[in-house]
Image (cartoon, grey):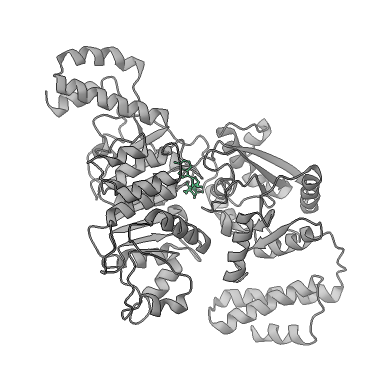
Amino acid sequence: MDTYDIFKQLTAGVRFTKKRTAPPSKPNGVSAAKETPPQQKPVIKPAEDSDSGEDCSAADDFRLLADTGTAENAPKRKKAKKQLSKEQAEQLQRVEEINALRKQNLITVLGKDVPAPIKLFDDLRTSEYKLLPRLLENLTSYGFAQPTPIQMQALPVLLKDRALMACAPTGSGKTLAFLTPIINGLRCHKTTGLRALVLAPTRELAQQIYRECGELTKGTGLRTHFISKVSEAKQQYGPECKQKYDILISTPNRVRFLLQQQPPLLDFKSIEWLVLDEADRLMEEGQNNFKEQLDDIYAACTNPQKRVAFFSATYTVPVAKWALRHLKNLVRVTIGVQNSATDTVKQELLFVGSESGKLLAVREMVRQGLQPPVLVFVQSKERAKQLFEELLYDGINVDVIHAERTQHQRDNCVRAFREGHIWVLICTELMGRGIDFKGVNLVINYDFPPSKISYIHRIGRTGRAGRPGRAVTFFTQDDTANLRSIAQIIKNSGGEVPEYMLQMKKVSKSEAKMRSKKPLDREDITTKIRPETPKNSVKLQKIDKAEKVLKRKDNTDKNSINKAKKLGKMKEQLKGKAPLAKGKAKKSMNASK
Ligand SMILES: Nc1ncnc2c1ncn2[C@@H]1O[C@H](COP(=O)(O)OP(=O)(O)OP(=O)(O)O)[C@@H](O)[C@H]1O
């Protein structure tokens, strides 16, 4: 009996969709049909909600192969078993065990000859994986009882040098799932230069991965670097620098900046591992997004043998398409349902009437007793500052983090929150992804998230590593457009939502996209009464106009940036704070013309 016969028996009773049996005409040969491993049968597992437009068509493209046996197939298999040799019967049993393990852990895989998942970290000790004893020791020192589902499947895939696109819920241990194979692959320090590159969308996340890498590389001799200041880059890893690092962890903009220096301050010729954490964010196209930077970085990693891995809790169709087109021998792993919220978070939607209702709601929550640590998300740095000012006088132990604070302030803020000195941290989307604050009890979405992808990541800052968490999302009449898709996510993860929300009108793809890019104009967060004189409003209008002119020019030179900053400050002052210096407004507004 050859492989084809075994395949026939294993897939008895399975109907293959037309899409999956299409001829293998995809450019990289990783068509779904070709990828179908003999032991797998297709089960369609789309995300239930498909209405937001931003990622709704993912359902079709993300059809994954699950490995489940059905009662319907059982008798046929039994009959077939009689004809199998002992070796084949054993093989069949092994396949069934693998399928059962995947089913139990909601692991779905797509790819050719996908390695079996492991049950225990200790399984990596075998000759098949040859995990460095010191690395295993470091892993064991965390005291985790067993690998999480993503670790069970991603570790063997990456340890076998396959390209990987992994999607697993927030807080499910993806960081260890990519750092372990990198460290094992590099094994010991070499003076050849950088051999692994890990990219993350924010400095805070890159720093967190760097810290985790430090723990895991203990005693291996491997040297990891995190780009803290680009100005120090030349001394740290320029051509004349003697100190050579093995692993670099950073954000795409810093890396690209250093690559663009003459001569380039980074050399990626020897990169053997390229990992994108929050891959869907890094692959976002358009202004202020990372895709362009990533293209340059990817082009600089010229080693054809490099392993590439994408990790995220959410994916969009273009990312999957890119991966299929560019990555050979790709394995796709999904835990649970694609683009869904983690089920350890109790999610609530709270109608607060108006903007001022939000402050009342927060104060009421405080009055009833908040259990810190708490993260509060707002849509912009201006609003973060406003909310901070309000809560500061309420006697809450609060701080704020946003892109306008200095690196030093941001680092201190994160540290203080981690150490419990700050109980309530107000933040922007900056902290929405990847940040692992242990034990966050509550996430408050003070401003409604701009997309369901943003919602999934924001609320994923709580309920991590299997712990329970709670998320409260405020909404007003202005937020109803995205309400349906978020209500659907809550329902999909087992929460309760009123039926009317699920029946609301669907938002078109283009509107959802527009909303995710441009946050709503909201009233300022304040309880202070600010007298708005006619004079002030005229000045404000003029400033708005000047800002628009500057934006249209799209100047990124120092002068324009300073002007924009000045205008922003003046606007704030006019809105009711410090008095504006005479003649200053006029001067700046004229200068922008
Ligand atoms: N096998 C394990 N068992 C229990 N906890 C684990 C295990 N592996 C990792 N963790 C812990 O789970 C927490 C979340 O891990 P991690 O930050 O890697 O999540 P993530 O999946 O990357 O989340 P996100 O999508 O939000 O970035 C960390 O505190 C980590 O120490």
Please state the total of marks drawn on the protein image.
0
Name which residue lies at 34% across and 44% down. Answer: 155
Name which residue lies at 60% across and 41% down. Answer: 486
Q: Quadrant of residue 554?
A: bottom right
Q: Nearer the viewer, residue 101 or 168?
A: 101
Measuring from the top left, give residue 124's x and y in whole percent. 30, 41
Q: Nearer the viewer, residue 175 or 474?
A: 175
Q: Is residue 293 left or right of residue 331?
A: right
The quadrant in which the N terminus is found is top left
Measuring from the top left, give residue 127's x and y in whole percent. 22, 41
Name which residue lies at 26% across and 49% down. Answer: 161
Q: Is residue 329 left or right of residue 387?
A: left
Q: In the rendered image, is residue 571 in sight?
A: yes
Measuring from the top left, give residue 492's x and y in whole percent. 55, 33
* Vertical order, 13 against 228 (above or below): above
Name which residue lies at 35% across and 15% down. Answer: 71
Q: Is residue 241 left or right of residue 581?
A: left
Q: Quadrant of residue 108?
A: top left
Measuring from the top left, give residue 5's x and y in whole percent. 16, 24
